[in-house]
């Protein structure tokens, strides 16, 4: 699993990628050619302090490394994925887990629909 970085890759992901949401999380994904790439992001608009943004990103990375990597490894295609925290309140570790699981279920459902059609 690699980190998603580089302005061109991220711009392409947001311009031509697909998204799935489960408040307060949003997942934007795009089929990639090389390996799975994952990134996390938090809005500067809602969290002015870098300390708060970094804490949320740490919480997201823990959730991503656990569940999302297993699911991506089982897929036929490689994906570039960005997980965004779009909520306005500071999350708690146990509070993020159900939303992330819901987000993963929606991603699986939408991805399987796109592959079959």
Image (spheres, helix red, strand yellow):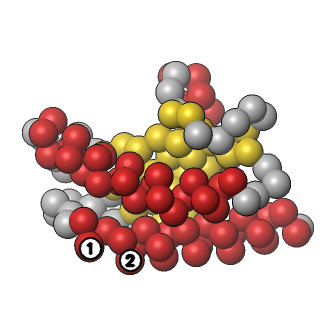
* Residue 116 point in image, percent of width and height: 88, 69
Residue under the point 15% across and 36% down: 50
Question: On screen, 9 above or below 85?
Answer: above
State the residue in front, 98 or 19.
98
State left or right for residue 103 relative to residue 9: left
Residue under the point 40% across and 59% down: 63
State the residue in front, 26 or 105.
105
Q: How many numbered marks have been drawn onto this rendered protein structure? A: 2
Name of the residue lying farthest toward the right: 117
* Residue 102 point in image, percent of width and height: 48, 76
Contact, mark 2 vs mark 1 (Cβ under 8 Å): yes
Label 1, on which residue?
A: 95
Is residue 69 visible in this depiction of the protein? yes
Q: Quadrant of the N terminus?
A: top right
Question: On screen, 26 above or below 45?
Answer: below
- Say what secondary structure mark 2 lies in: helix
Label 2, on which residue?
A: 98
* Residue 14 point in image, percent of width and height: 56, 41
State left or right for residue 26 relative to residue 109: left
State the residue in front, 108 or 28.
108
The quadrant in which residue 12 appears is top right
- Say what secondary structure mark 1 lies in: helix
* Residue 85 point in image, percent of width and height: 34, 55
Question: On screen, 112 above or below 90?
Answer: below
Crowd band around label 2 with a 10 angstrom C-alpha radius: few (<14), some (14–19), many (20+): few
Is residue 31 visible in this depiction of the protein? no
């Amino acid at each position: 699993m690699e980190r998603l970085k580089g302005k061109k890759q991220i711009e392409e992901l947001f311009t031509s990628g697909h998204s799935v949401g489960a408040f307060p999380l949003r997942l934007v994904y795009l089929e990639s050619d090389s390996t799975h790439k994952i990134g996390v992001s938090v809005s500067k608009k809602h969290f002015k302090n870098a300390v708060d943004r970094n804490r949320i990103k740490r919480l997201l990375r823990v959730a991503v490394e656990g569940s999302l990597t297993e699911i991506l490894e089982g897929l036929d295609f490689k994906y570039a994925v960005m997980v965004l925290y779009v909520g306005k309140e500071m999350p708690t570790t146990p509070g993020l887990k159900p939303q992330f699981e819901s987000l993963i279920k929606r991603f699986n459902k939408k991805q399987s629909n796109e592959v079959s059609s």
